[in-house]
Image (cartoon, rainbow, N blue to C red):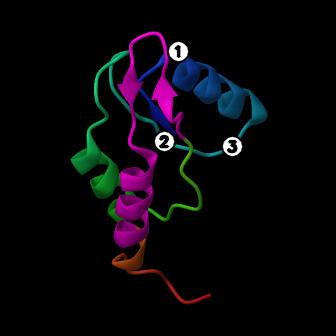
């Protein structure tokens, strides 16, 4: 979960109530996400999904979804995965 907005906080709450196993990479409302921390987290533990709001309309923060997708794909491709 990526959270730097009111929407992000609500999404985290929904996922928590649903009982999913997840980690949060966050920033204060309106601040940019720490993309280095995101890549670090993706490479440290198996990750099946990443959920983020595209933007925070109240602050005008753009989370650059296309850039996030490229980072996630690159990090996941370069992560050692155990054979199934």
Identify the element where label 3 is drawn.
loop
Q: Is residue 57 above or below residue 63?
A: above
Give the numbered dot on residue 6.
1
Q: Which residue does the numbered mark 2 point to in the structure image?
A: 23
Identify the element where label 1 is drawn.
helix
Point out residue 48 in the picture as x, y percentages from the top left corner.
Answer: 59, 62
Point out residue 14 in the picture as x, y percentages from the top left corner.
Answer: 71, 27
* Between discs 1 and 3, the one toward the N terminus: 1
Task: Report the side of 66 relative to 83 (left or right).
Answer: left
Disc 1/disc 3 C-alpha distance (Å)? 20 Å
Return the residue found at the far left: 36
Return the residue found at the far right: 18
* Between discs 2 and 1, the one toward the N terminus: 1
Q: Which residue does the numbered mark 3 point to in the structure image?
A: 20
Q: Residue at x 49, y 65 (%)?
A: 46
Task: Report the side of 16 relative to 82 (left or right).
Answer: right
Image-quadrant location for residue 39: bottom left
Q: In this rendering, which labeled residue sits more in front, label 1 or label 3? A: 1
Span highlighted in magenta in the image = 52-75
> Magenta stretch: residue 57 in it?
yes
> Are the residues tagged 2 and 1 within 8 Å (C-beta)?
no
Task: Report the side of 48 relative to 64 (left or right).
Answer: right
Q: Nearer the viewer, residue 10 or 21?
A: 10
Q: Residue at x 54, y 33 (%)?
A: 53
């Amino acid at each position: 979960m990526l959270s730097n907005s009111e929407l992000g906080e609500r999404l985290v709450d929904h996922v928590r109530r649903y009982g999913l196993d997840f980690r949060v990479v966050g920033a204060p409302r309106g601040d940019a996400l720490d993309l280095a921390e995101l890549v670090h987290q993706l490479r440290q533990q198996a990750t099946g999904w990443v959920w983020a709001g595209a933007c925070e309309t109240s602050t005008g923060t753009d989370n650059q979804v296309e850039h996030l997708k490229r980072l996630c794909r690159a990090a996941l491709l370069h992560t050692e995965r155990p054979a199934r």
